[in-house]
Amino acid sequence: MATLKQIRQRIRAAKNIQQITKAMKLVAAARLKKATDRVLEARPYADKLKDIMTSMSASGTLPSHPLLTKREVQNVLVIVLTSDRGLAGAFNTSILRRATDFFKSLEGKPMHMIAYGKKANQFFGKRGYSIVDSYSAPSAGAQLSDAVAITRKAREMFESGEVDAVYVVYSKFISAIRQIPQTVQLLPIEAPEGEETAASGEVEFEPSADVVLNTLLPRYFQTLVWQAMLESTASEFGARMSAMTAATDNAGKMIHTLTLKANRERQAAITKEILEVVGGAEALN
């Protein structure tokens, strides 16, 4: 049974933990606000590019382009977006599980990976997966330079024929308490499904269809990668803020329980001393 001194030590430890989790919660909340703003600012641009791709696809006049090339899928490249640090609830675990399930669905096809975040690199590196490139996820959030580098590497592997399809596994941001792991195909580029086309009939290209595609498709691909990275960043901060909120509340409950226990132990000690004094007095009489 714990002594009063041990209980007080536990209370001090719980208070220290509570202070740390409160500070981490505040930091995550501030970063979440910035990350959310970046996601909301980027979504309209990505949606507009999707509309343009839908309109162009509906025209039926698109020339051939390396990023549109469809071939039998023999080799796959998967971009897995995680974080460098833990203490974010089930954020990393859900992404790693989603990626693992997707790898199993490939039924033994050769698979390569670009790992973004130390969690993905460590998890899959220990299990012998082919990691062709890895990146560290900055604590302040995703950087455009990383998106450009990832896009360049994935494009080179696809256009050279080293891989036949490119996917990304990330966590889509819904709210601070809800993030949904997703697997999305990036290459070959396909027009969004289930949407009404914004244009009917033929589409005129100026100066030419080749020039438009050579400009639009690489940018569209990079936008998809960048959007996924922004969504993942916001999801990470949202999950971390929720996790630190829960940890702070649990520390508070622990402090309350230990304080009550300490009070009972102190009262029992005082009662025992009083009884000893009274017993000693009666013995003298």
Image (cartoon, grey):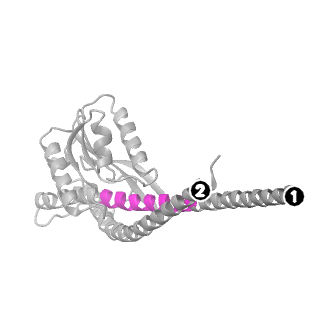
Magenta stretch encompasses residue 236: yes
Q: Pick the residue in front: 198 or 180.
A: 180
Q: Is residue 100 magenta?
A: no
Query: Which residue in the protein does label 1 denote?
Result: 282
Where does the image place residue 194, in percent across and percent down from the top left? 40, 53
Is 210 left, or right, of 13 in this rendering? left
Question: In the rendered image, is residue 251 in sight?
Answer: yes
> Type of residue at label 2?
Lys
Whole-percent x and y of residue 242? 49, 60
Query: Spatial distance from mark 1 to mark 2, Cα to Cα?
Result: 31 Å
Residue 80 vertical placement versus 280 (above, below)? above
| Label pair 1/2, CB-CB below 8 angstroms | no
Q: Residue at x 22, y 57 (%)?
A: 147
Marks 1 and 2: which is nearer the front? 1
Mark 1 falls on what kind of element?
Answer: helix
Q: Earlier in the sequence, mark 1 or mark 2?
A: 2
Q: Position of residue 98 (x, y in %)?
A: 40, 43
What is the three-letter code of the residue carrying label 1? Glu
Q: Position of residue 203 (x, y in %)?
A: 22, 62
Q: Residues within 10 Å of mark 2 (few under 14, many from 20)?
A: few
> Which residue does the image show at 35% across and 57% down from the upper left?
232
The residue range painted magenta reads: 227-251
Residue at image position (11%, 60%) is: 211
Can you tell which mark lies on residue 215?
Answer: none
Residue farthest along the top direction in this orientation: 108
Disc 2: which residue = 5
**In this image, 188 relative to 208: left or right?**
right
Return the residue nearer the eye: 221 or 147. Answer: 147
Give the residue at x 46% y 53%.
89
Name the quadrant containing residue 158: top left
